[in-house]
Image: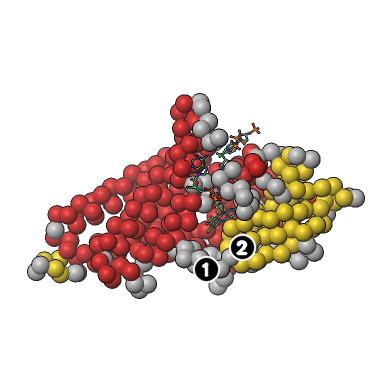
Amino acid sequence: KDLIRPIADLGLLGANLHGYDCAGMSAVTYGLAMQELERADSGIRSFASVQGSLCMYPIYAYGSEEQKKKWLPSMARGEKIGCFGLTEPDFGSNPSGMLTTAEKKGAGYVLHGTKMWITNGTMADLAIVWARLDGKIRGFIVEKGTPGFTANEVTGKLSLRASDTAELAFDRCEIPAENILPGVEGLKGPLGCLNQARYGISWGVLGAAHACFYEALGYSKQRIQFDRPLAGFQLVQRKLAMMATEITKGQLLALRVGRLKDEGKVTPAQISMAKMNNVKVALDCARTTRDILGANGILDEYTSMRHMMNLESVYTYEGTHDIHTLVIGEALTGIPAYK
Ligand code: TGC
Ligand code: FAD
């Protein structure tokens, strides 16, 4: 939590949004910033992704002018924290099955249901919650303290331990009419937000990969076995060379996708390709570094195992590796293979 205000002061919350006290960075600059946050820890980048791409973005893209003025400047300053509730206990990869409902009551709405695995959930001042209203998926702003809204921390995580993860419960939770997002209906609403966040992840994870690579390089030059530094063995050099090559390829992919995004030409499948590939690259780099460090690699004074554990979550959230494979498969063949 101590890092929130310094990150906000750098302009990194809602960094690529324009106006409303946001920094108005290009997609590429925003991506580079996510890379640097995740060099430290995926949980820190997760915080910024959710705040900017999953909570500020839907207000920016689908909200009323009053909603934008009310929330975006204070969220850019890190004074108000947001979360994004799409996933449910029984609907992860398939959010179209969601059970959370909204019903009209008087001038407002009543929300009922449960959201699971929600990043920033317990600390959030507002939640963007996706629910069915008359059968159609709509977005709602639910403010902390609204009667019937509770957030319970998920405990026992071996991954993203620096991140706040929660279950959100809505028990006949009444919200005012002005808290519906007027600008979108249907699954394309939340999926449009995910495009923003998945793009940021495609850069972010390469920061974690970089951190691991430099740890492996430094360690292997120092550590002597069989009277030579580990870095002097061909097998170790191969591992270092492959990491450097895959990180460079991943950066080029993210850069191309970022430039397409800045030109307004990027497709969801291109973003899926970058998320899918780069998370796998980062996970492989973290595992390889842990291997090069030998037994020392399991200690928390080194970073690679922490990054590895974090990246297991990143491999799953924002669309699993397999779901992104299927998005690319559909784009190539025209045949959806999810169901
Ligand atoms: P489908 O029928 O294909 O599409 C429904 C409507 O949505 C449109 N659409 C998109 N729009 C914008 N961006 C995209 N990427 C889109 N993909 C599809 C589509 O055109 C259609 O529009 P319309 O106008 O015809 O209604 O939907 P489907 O039900 O078959 O699902 C497709 C699938 C499986 C790809 C989708 O459900 C999916 O992406 N599933 C993965 C779920 C997921 O990623 N959840 C993430 C939750 S949030 C999270 O993990 C945050 S982690 C936070 C952190 O960083 O800490
Ligand atoms: P499932 O959907 O049950 O998938 C399990 C396995 O089955 C995976 O390997 C998957 O690829 C595979 N699978 C599923 N469907 C298919 C298919 N059609 N074909 C082939 N294989 C398939 N959600 C939010 O809404 N907001 C958040 O802020 C948020 N933060 C998160 C933070 C963390 C730390 C984690 C771990 C998750 C978070 N999530 C969040 C939830 C995340 O988006 C889901 O975990 C993810 O979408 C996968 O859903 P699931 O866990 O239910 O797995």
Residue 72 picture location, percent across and down:
67, 55
Specify which label sits upstream in the sequence, 1 or 2. 1
Foreground residue among 54 and 7? 54
Foreground residue among 151 and 27? 151
The kind of secondary structure element at disc 2 is strand
Give the residue type that dot 2 points to.
Answer: Ala
Q: Closer to the camera: disc 1 or disc 2?
A: 1
Residue 189 picture location, percent across and down:
66, 42
Quarter holding residue 155: bottom right
Residue 98 picture location, percent across and down:
67, 46
Side (left or right) of 207 relative to 52:
left
Hey, which residue is sitting farthest left in the picture?
227
Side (left or right) of 206 relative to 60:
left
- The residue sitting at 26% across, 49% down in the picture is 242
Q: Quadrant of the C terminus?
A: top right
Residue on which the image places disc 1: 156
Relative to 250, is 211 above or below? below
The kind of secondary structure element at disc 1 is loop
Side (left or right) of 80 relative to 222:
right
- The residue sitting at 55% across, 60% down in the picture is 47
Residue 12 in sight from this viewpoint: no
- Assess disc 2: are there few (<14), some (14-19) or many (≥20) residues with their C-alpha within 10 Å of its C-alpha: many
Quadrant of picture, ligand 1: top right
Give the residue type that dot 1 points to.
Answer: Gly
Residue 163 picture location, percent across and down:
53, 65
Q: Which mark is residue 166?
A: 2
How far is mark 1 from mark 2, CA to CA?
A: 12 Å
- The residue sitting at 44% across, 56% down in the picture is 312
